[in-house]
Image (cartoon, rainbow, N blue to C red):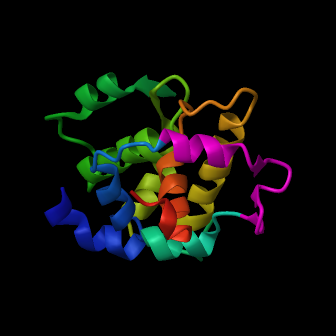
Amino acid sequence: MEPLYKDCWYDNGIYHAITCSTLQLQADSPLLGSSLAFWNSASNTFDFGVGPMSISILNLAMIFGFRLSGLIGFTQAFGAFMGAFMNRAVDYPHGEHIMFLMYWLNRFIFPSASNCITMEWLHLAKSLVSYRDIATGPLILGSIYRALREATIVPINLNVKGPLCMVQIWLQWTFPELRD
């Protein structure tokens, strides 16, 4: 799909996140686990010795290319969702692209605990396909904060659904000495 929709993904600020989701990134459990011990859900910050700090919308734009500004919705299992739309003509233009974005949003950005495709992101997928001015940064930041909160409910749980890999990349970007 990349050759067909690369320009659209660039325009919407999601290209780098989509390509990042195709990589087999290895979770650095010691890094994430130790950093989560410093997470403060009340202020959405890591309370490190240097002072409170947090991943921000600007960090998301710098590292992943998400858009900072712009405009700010039945469930189905992943396999059933893919099976329902594979090799099937759809009633609206760019249907395959919309279904791909629905899968990507539900699998990597806004995953549900039930591992299902939720149709609440359909309007976002359609908007991304139609090049609407969508601020993707705040949406993803909200998903990251939700995942961080869920991960730090006692005891620390690194198996939560959400884009914790983005937190790991941010930590390694912010603290180069933590890179392998």
Examine the rendered structure and indicate whether residue 138 appears above or below residue 125.
Answer: below
Nearest the viewer among 147 and 133 is 147
Work out whether residue 110 can be spotted.
Answer: no
Nearest the viewer among 80 and 66 is 66
Q: Say which quadrant the C terminus sits in.
A: bottom left
Residue occupying the point 83% across, 56% down: 43
Work out whether residue 34 can be spotted.
Answer: yes
Residue 131 vs residue 110: left or right? left
Nearest the viewer among 180 and 83 is 180
Q: Residue 101, position in %: x, y?
A: 36, 50
Examine the rendered structure and indicate whether residue 99 appears above or below residue 1.
Answer: above
Residue 42 counted in the magenta span: yes
Rendered image quadrant of residue 56: bottom right
Q: Residue 175, position in %: x, y?
A: 55, 67
Rendered image quadrant of residue 47: bottom right
Residue 41 counted in the magenta span: yes
Residue 8 vs residue 147: left or right? left
Magenta segment:
29-53
Residue occupying the point 25% across, 34% down: 85
Residue 34 vs residue 116: left or right? right
Farthest-out residue, right: 42
Count of numbered circles in the view: 0
Residue occupying the point 26% across, 74% down: 7
Q: Residue 150, position in %: x, y?
A: 68, 35
Q: Residue 151, position in %: x, y?
A: 65, 36
Q: Say which quadrant the N terminus sits in.
A: bottom left
Residue occupying the point 24% across, 48% down: 96
Examine the rendered structure and indicate whether residue 30 appears above or below residue 115.
Answer: below
Residue 152 vs residue 127: left or right? right
